[in-house]
Amino acid sequence: MPADTVSARPPSAVRGARRKSPGPLWAVMYHSVADCADDPYQVTISPGRLERQLRWLRRHGLTGVSMGRLLRARAEGRGAGLVGLTFDDGYADFVDQAVPLLRRYDCTATVFVLPGRLGGTNAWDSPGPRKPLLTEEGVRRACEAGMEVGSHGLCHTDLTRAGDPLLAAETGQSRAMLRTITGAEVTGFCYPYGSVDARAVAAVRAAGYTYACAISPGPLTGMFALPRVHVGEKDTGLRLHLKRRLHRWRREPVPAAARPAVTPAGGTGS
């Protein structure tokens, strides 16, 4: 090909061939969506505040999507304007409160579920108010609504303190259980408490996941330890703007070479 072939193309064609850089990966972490005055661990956001945050995203040209979709889009150079939305612990209010708002603003999200506690409560948050968790039917409803279902382990166990048999169950068994419930592939994992070390990362990889979320994983940052920022009731539009701008300096950047594995046919992750 002659050296000047590309430069000879019309400027508009050259511009059209370029893809906007997706920029730093930005993913936010939610938990429960409800009106709750007693929230000692700051894991609850009101439906009204969540709606205002989703409206802020759309007004600023941003779209909230599941982690699976975000990672696939970034791997293909199409991630500009996409924000990963995640909901930890699998609270029952995700289906009743979060999903209707997400669909209203044309967003999707990933809900990280505890299949060992389906229909139970957040007993690990003690003392504190008890909140109901999703049942099997609730998990299926989330999946049918176009949301990605990922694993948060079996029972909200700190993997960095788990023995080998428990570590294997929390990662591998939880994935198998969710796959049976949803009838779809489960590719995402989320470390309880955000606690992660090299051993936990190795277990998640061995269990067959293609990515995993943490909070501030430092030097472990990569496809199996993705950083996120907590977003809660106090986060106004201004605070969201600041958190987004500061994210690249407060979290290790995800390596540019990081790419998710191909999602098997029939997998979720809208």
Image (cartoon, rainbow, N blue to C red):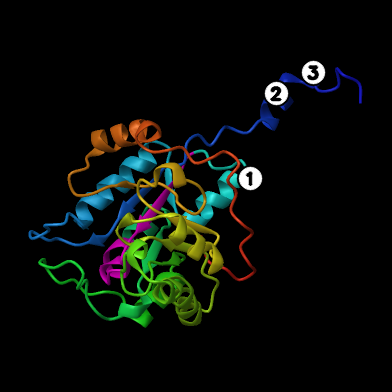
| Residue 187 image point, x, y percent | 52, 65
Res 122 quadrant in image: bottom left
How far is mark 3 from mark 1, CA to CA? 24 Å
Can residue 269 be seen here?
no
- Please, what secondary structure does the residue beneath circle 3 have? loop
Q: Is residue 106 left or right of residue 74?
A: left
- Secondary element at image label 1: loop
Q: Is residue 29 above or below residue 241?
A: below
**What residue type is disc 2 on?**
Ser
Instruction: Examine the structure image and report whether residue 228 is included in the region drawn in magenta.
Output: no
Label 2 and label 1: CA atoms lie apart by: 22 Å
Find disc 3 in the rendering and name its residue. 7
Instruction: Please report the residue visible at 39 percent of the width from the left and 59 percent of the height from the top.
Output: 103
Question: Label 1: how many residues lie within 10 Å, few (<14), some (14-19) or many (20+)?
Answer: few
**264 displayed left or right of 211:** right
Residue of label 1: 76
**Label ID, residue 12:** 2
Q: Position of residue 33 (x, y in %)?
A: 23, 61
Give the farthest residue toward the right: 1
Marks 2, 1: nearer the viewer: 1
The region drawn magenta spans 81-99
Q: Position of residue 111 (x, y in %)?
A: 38, 64
Q: How many marks?
A: 3
Along the line of sight, the residue nearer the viewer: 136 or 142 = 136
Which image quadrant is residue 161 in? bottom left
How far apart marks 2 and 3 lie (CA) works out to 11 Å
Identify which residue is drawn at 46% across, 45% down.
221
Pick the quarter of the image with the N terminus: top right
